[in-house]
Image (cartoon, rainbow, N blue to C red):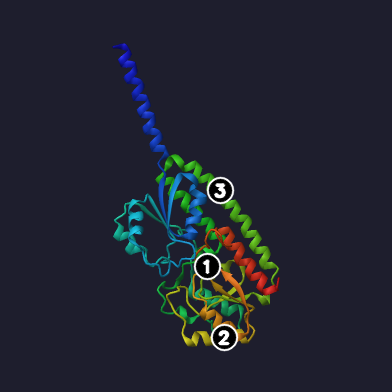
Amino acid sequence: MHLSVRLASAISVITFASLSYSAAAEPLKVVASFSIIGDFAKNVGGDRIELTTLVGPNGDAHVYEPKPADAASVAAADVVLVNGLHFEGFLNRLVEASGTKAAVVELTKGVEPLSVEEEKEGHAHEAEAQDDHASEAHEGHDHGPIDPHAFQSIANAKIYVKNMADAFCAADAEGCDSYRANAQTYSEQLGALETEVKEAVAAIPANKRTVITSHDAFGYFDHAYDITFLAPEGISTEAEASAADVAKLIRQVREDNASAIFVENITNQRLIEQIASETGLKIGGTLYSDALSDAGGPAATYIDMMKNNIGAIKGAILGS
């Protein structure tokens, strides 16, 4: 009898230990709305999370149409990470359709948002000789007056990372120390990246810091690093440029108000190719705006994306 009691006790201990291990090994189920946020999540969550990214590399979250599998992923999630500021047009209906009980975390909380009008006024102040800002296609876009592309500022990216660590800690208290440590390490890497970007911009003459892109995704980059981006389309790729917008932009380029022109990885190149053809500007390469490249590309991570973009801009303007 004594042996039976000891054996039963041992089995209970083993069973309890197995259950504890199973619970500890269960990863936090995280859904990221698009690839840039997915990369942040990998850096903060590490091996404690199981990550699903809805809009993948080179994907356009402005026009993305959710799939049934996306609703299933959101329904099963513990945390859903989103940009907010109406960046993901598909998000509300997807969350409602999924019936998820997960925390939906807007990572732009605490970011100082830029309004489209502020961006226009800033450009007008910097270039008083310009008659009007080239991107009046902002009017009628679906995002309202706020530019949602806050991740184009590295200082804002640090805010995203902090908000993400807070969300992971709330959902998985046992992993909180790990999430905080990962966030700290990654934020230090972002700090070094910002220094690198600022040094690259400083090497570009101030009167050469105006470039053309497809849509207005770079307002926060403009505001943070003093490079002016003009675009024929508004802040959403859903807003097509009118003939008048394109003509106005071409006129500005011909008046030598732009030094380089770029295609974006998420947009059709045709419009930029037309502007380049009519102005004689050589396309300076590809900028990654709302999405990372695939794993084999030059912008597979957020840090790589920012390095690629400033390198392409500097190279196209300085010819190096």
Can the viewer see residue 129 in this picture? Answer: no
- Point out residue 226 in the picture as x, y percentages from the top left corner: 62, 70
| Image quarter hosting the C terminus | bottom right
The residue pinned by badge 2 equals 250
- Point out residue 244 in the picture as x, y percentages from the top left corner: 49, 88
Q: Is residue 122 left or right of residue 109?
A: right
- Point out residue 233 in the picture as x, y percentages from the top left corner: 48, 78
The residue pinned by badge 1 equals 289
Can the viewer see residue 46 in this picture? Answer: yes
**Residue depicted at x 61% and y 81%:** 127
Q: What element carries label 2?
A: helix
**Residue depicted at x 48% and y 60%:** 35
In the figure, residue 304 lies in which quadrant? bottom right
In the image, residue 196 sits, relative to residue 180, either above or below, namely below
Q: Distance between the residues labelled 2 and 1?
A: 22 Å
Residue kind at label 2, given as amino acid type: Ile
In the image, residue 37 sits, relative to residue 172, either above or below, namely below
Q: What element carries label 1?
A: loop
Q: In this view, does 183 lie to the left or right of 227?
A: left
The residue pinned by badge 3 equals 184
**Residue depicted at x 42% and y 76%:** 141
